[in-house]
Structures are given as structure tokens and as C-alpha cells.
Image (tube, rainbow, N blue to C red):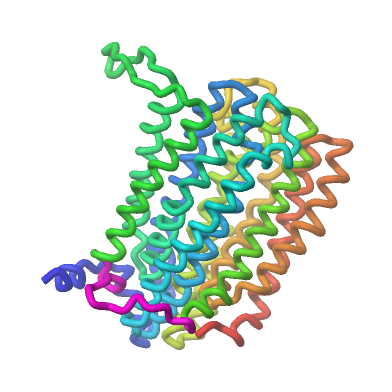
Amino acid sequence: MGKDRRQKKTGRAEELLFKIKNGKELTSAEQLQLVLRLSLPAVMAQITSIIMQYIDASMVGQLGAAKSAAIGLVSTSTWLFGGLCIAAAAGFSVQAAQLIGAGRDAQARAVLRQAIVATMMFSAALLLVGMAISRPLPGWLGADAEIREDAVRYFTVYVLSLPFVQLCLLSANMLQCSGNMRTPSILNVMMCALDVVLNSLLIFPERQGEIFGIAVRIPGADLGVAGAALGTALAQGITGILMCYFLVARSSILHLSRGESWRPEWECIERAVRIAVPMGLEHALMNGAMIATTRIVAPLGNISIAANSFAVTAESLCYMPGYGIADAATTLIGQSLGAGRRELVRRFSRLTVAIGMAVMAATGAVMFFAAPWMLALLTPDPEIQELGVRVLRIEAFAEPLFAASIVVSGALRGAGDTLIPSLMNFFSLWFVRLPLAILLSARLGLTGVWIAMCAELCFRGVIFLIRLYRERWLRNAAL
């Protein structure tokens, strides 16, 4: 009965994915409709995750520049650990997408079982590494003494939450690769609401407030920076558990049943390693470059550290739609390849890239004009606002080509092509962005760092478009 209920809950996106799997023709209108139906929920999920960062930054910004700088200092390090969790999840979800496209649902469920065990072990190992480096990390990054303790507290809470971060990412990726973009999107909106409530209770002390004109006493734990990390960790943990439930108990394709084998399948794990290791190295090298950028920014003072952090957070609202479209591209390319529909692979890859570039050109224009309002939401400090607005407006010009690199990477990931894109990202960041940032920061301060970032993102977009249109990646597609 449960299985029957699951099978009845199909929407238009599932119908169109079914046509891919069964070799039926899709009109141009249906291809566009499928891209939009898969992209929009994924875009909303990405945007809500960024809204959580806005909430954290805005609330902590009320505590002063030093507190904001403490979070900004370790933010690139938390992205590094989160990126490794993303890579681990992708190693299995790409396999599942291609197996679903080939109509091999039972094998896709076997991949999910392997993924749960392997990624939980991986996140536990990351937790241990994170705890080992949490105390010396701020010193390595060149932080002033006044912000080191807050930076340690924030990073420590984050690494303790890594198993829940991994569970949330894996469950969302697996649901998305099966064509279910709606559930992760709804749960991410819920996570955002939880984050607001929990951060409000944990960051600030008990205080007087007003709800609908009625004076109320609002409880508070007064944990400051640590409260921001703990509120987000709890919101993500609750969401991860719910996401996992909808995956293993309610998914029409990937639901698990009793009696299924959980023994290691080394061929599956080896494939996951081949896909995930280049992605993991890519995230490590990219975030390593960002950490190096933080090291370049740190001597410029707390105002520059805070402005850099807030500007990165503000910009992310503009580029996260690109990551949502990239998620849809991964699903479409993976399922199309699994079904042996290479002509659809070509069409979907180009269509998703065009949509991504158009969307991020629009968000870049909005960011250019709305930059003062965006920074005002994040911090009341006028010096931080002025510097943050200046660098954001520089970055706005890079958004269309930044979109190209993001969405092309998602499309190539669906084909299992992760090594060459990782090397391209490595070269672009370490041999274009960082040398330029070092050179320009000496004369222009934080503005020079962001000019370097803008130039590098444009370069990266061009080389990814070249990779896409040459189509060498199609010759060695996974599975």
C-alpha cells in the first residue's frame, strides 16, 4: 500500500523524466519546461541557504565589527569542510542519477545504502580533523588576538555538526537526482525559518520585545558568535533528519526496505571515489585559495575582514541561483546519459548554461544597484558598508561568466567528468586570482582583491564554455 501511494505522487517533472528514461521524444518546449521545473525548486533551496547566512551575518553584525570579523575569518575554512561533504555526496548521487535514467532502480537503491554508510564515516573523520585544528586555525590565518577566541568557538561548533551537514547534503542530492526537487526545497525553507528562531534565542541575551503591539519578554542564551553557529547547526540537523526520512521512507524510487544488503560493494565505492576525489581536491584547492585570500585580507584590518565577509555573503544571493540550475543540470545530464540519450545531453547542457547566464546577468544587475541596501541589512557600521558596496559593484560585472563556470561544472558532473574541471578551477584560482590579488592589494587594499576576483571569474567562465562546446567530456562519460 505504501509503495502504491509513493508511485501515485508524480508531477509533470516526473512525467517528463519518465519520457527520457523510456526513449520518448521531448519537444523543445518540454525540454525548457523540464529544466525550469527542476531548476526553480533547486534555486529556491540554494537561496534559502544563503538567507540563513544573511541571518547569521545580520544578527552577529549587531554585536560589532570584531564579532563579524571572527566569523568572516573562519568562513572559508567552514566552506572547505562543507565542500568536501558535497564531493562525498556527489560521488554516489551521480551514480544514482545515471542508474535511474537507465531504469535500474534497484541498483540505485543499493548505491544509496553504500552512500549512507560511507559518507557518515567520512564526515566523522572530518569532524576529528576539524577538532584537531580548531584551536590553532585563527592564528594560522593571521587573526588579531581580540577575535581569535570567538573564531575558535564558531569553527568548533560547526565541525561538531558535520555528520548532520553530510546527512542533509546526501539526502538532498539523492532526492534531486531522482527528480524530486520539491521536497528538498520545502525543507530548506523550513530550515531557514528554524535558523531565524534559534539564532534569535541563542545569540542575544534575554530582552524586551514587541509582537503585534504587545510587549513580551524574549528569552535568550547570550552565546554571541557561538550561538550563531549552534542555531544554524541545530536547524541543519533537524532538517537533515527530516530529509533522510523523506528519502529512505517516502521516495518513489529510492525508498529502502528491510532485508536489503548493506555489505560494502567495492565497485560502487571505487566509482564514487573516482568521481568524488577530484571534486574534493577541487573544493580543497578552491577553498585553500579563499583561505589564502583571507590571509591577504587579514593584515588590512578588521574593517576589511568584515567588509570582505559581508560582501561575500551579499554576493552569494546573486550566484546561488546558478548553483540551483547546476543541480538541475546534473540530474538531467546524468539521467539522459543513463538512458543512452546523448542528443538530449547536448541540448540540456547548452540550455541550462544559457538559462544560468541569463539569470545571473539579471541578478548581477540587481546587485549593482541594490548593493547599499544589501550591506545595510548585514551591518550598521558605515565604514564596512561603504567598502562592501564598492567591492560588490566590481563583482557584479563577473556574474554572467561566473554562471557559465557554475552550470557547466554541474553538467559535467552529471556525466562523471570531474577531474578536468577540478584542474581548470585549480589553475584559474591559484595562477590567476591569487597572483593578481597579491599584486593589487598592495596598492588598492580590499578593492584590489575584488578586482582580481572579478578578472579571474571571467577567465574561468570562458575556459569552462570552451570545455563544454568541444564535447570531449562526452567520450568518457561515467557508467
**Closest to the observer: 336 or 344?**
336
**Residue appearing at x 31%, y 81% in the figure:** 106
Seen at 34% across and 84% down, the residue is: 103
In the rendered view, tell whether residue 223 sits above or below residue 43: above
Classify the position of the N terminus by image quarter.
bottom left
**x and y, in percent, of residue 186 in the image:** 33, 51
The residue that appears at 57% across and 50% down in the rendered structure is: 319
Give the x, y percent position of residue 40: 41, 57
Observer able to see residue 63: yes
Residue 51 in picture, x, y percent from top left = 47, 40
Q: Which residues are magenta?
A: 251-267
Quarter holding residue 205? top left
Instruction: List x then y, in percent, for residue 56.
Output: 50, 34
Q: Is residue 350 visible?
A: no
Q: Is residue 337 above or below residue 16?
A: below
Residue depicted at x 65% and y 76%: 469
Residue 406 counted in the magenta span: no
> Is 439 drawn above or below residue 425 in the view shown?
above
Whether 266 is among the magenta residues is yes
In the depicted view, which residue is nearer to us: 400 or 253? Answer: 253
Q: Is residue 239 left or right of residue 373?
A: left
Magenta stretch secondary structure, dominant: loop
Q: Is residue 264 left or right of residue 182?
A: right
